[in-house]
Amino acid sequence: MPGVTKEQIARAKEWDLLSYLQAFEPQELKKCGGREYRTVTHDSLKISNGKWNWHSRGIGGRTALDYLIKVRGMDFVSAVETLCGERGAAVWTPSEAPRVEKTEKLFILPKENRCGTAAVSYLLGRGIDADVISRCIREGILYESRQYHNCVFVGKDSAGKARYACLRGIYGSFKKDVDGSDKRYSFSLPSAHKDSSCVAVAESPIDALSVASLLKMQGEDWTKNHYLSLGGTAPRALLRFLHDHPAITHVSLCLDNDRAGLSGMGKIREALREDAGLSRRITVIADNPPPCAFGKDYNELLVQKNAARCAFVNREKAQAGKDSGIEK
């Protein structure tokens, strides 16, 4: 490695973040219970059990080296040298941060297939309502790719420019974000009402559309809400979406009912508290994971609800046949 030796790298990796901050930046540490600490600069950056996690950004690590690179923005060599100065790391300040030129991948949407029936059939098979699918197609946020016939879910910025896309295979479990996607602008289905005050937040596009489909199934006006996919559990897409939609005051967290989803809801709450503007504006943050009895996510719930409805309709038809004497 140019600039540093293997021995220096090994020594640098010996530093855990808590030891580093205790030795050289004790003013940056604040104890928040038991053996857990947080940093003063970033309230949601917690240190516990030899690991650190910056919850509001969805990043973490074990070593001080990880911290200096991911949080402080230092390049690898500078971070190693900082940690190896006779174990007397110079206290780093933002003005000293080296500027690192990053080569960004070009964002190009996959070519669209002229006929999207395969993707539509796949989504109908997952229980997504036909009207919900049609609206996505009209909004230009859903189509079928020419190659491989994947579902393409498109995320746009406030100016309507595509900034993100994710692929969902219709023949298997393939999932992938398109190279160069900006996850701050993840897939969303906007409300039909410009001043809508509510956004339903899910982990994936199919889960977000499942929430809309379930509301329609219940006879509610599903078009009055915004629907947002996070592309995971990190809050960055939600923070961007809320800043772009100032009328929103109600956030419904429809993440998966599993460890990652429940933890993600806590991180989202924390991120909203840390944002001064949003913490004043957002009046309701509701945790709405699907009931455990129906599976871990909203698509599993939707599939089961659809199956139950079909079974009910078939029973009613059979009963009507018996009552009319036309029994088969």
Image (cartoon, helix red, strand yellow):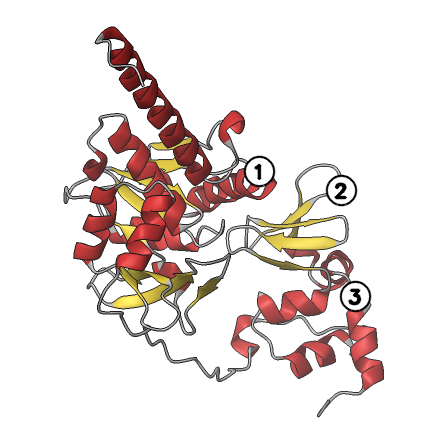
Q: What residue did someone put label 3 on?
A: 15
- Type of amino acid at the residue the image marks with label 2: Arg
The mark that comes first in sequence, 1 or 2, is 2
Closest to the observer, 219 or 126? 126
**Secondary structure at numbered mark 1:** loop
Q: Are marks 3 and 2 in contact (CB under 8 Å)?
A: no
Q: In the image, which is nearer the foreground, mark 3 or mark 1?
A: 1
Across and down, in percent, residue 159 comes to: 19, 64
Q: Quadrant of the N terminus?
A: bottom right
Q: In the image, which is nearer the foreground, mark 1 or mark 2?
A: 1
Structural crowding at the residue carrying mark 3, measured as other residues with C-alpha within 10 Å and reported as few (<14), some (14–19) or many (≥20): some
Please tell me which residue is depicted at 38% across the width and 44% down the height of the picture: 126
Q: What residue did someone put label 1 on?
A: 258
Determine the CA span between mark 3 and mark 1: 33 Å
- Type of amino acid at the residue the image marks with label 3: Trp
The mark that comes first in sequence, 3 or 2, is 3
Please tell me which residue is depicted at 72% across the width and 60% down the height of the picture: 62
Q: Quadrant of the C terminus?
A: top left
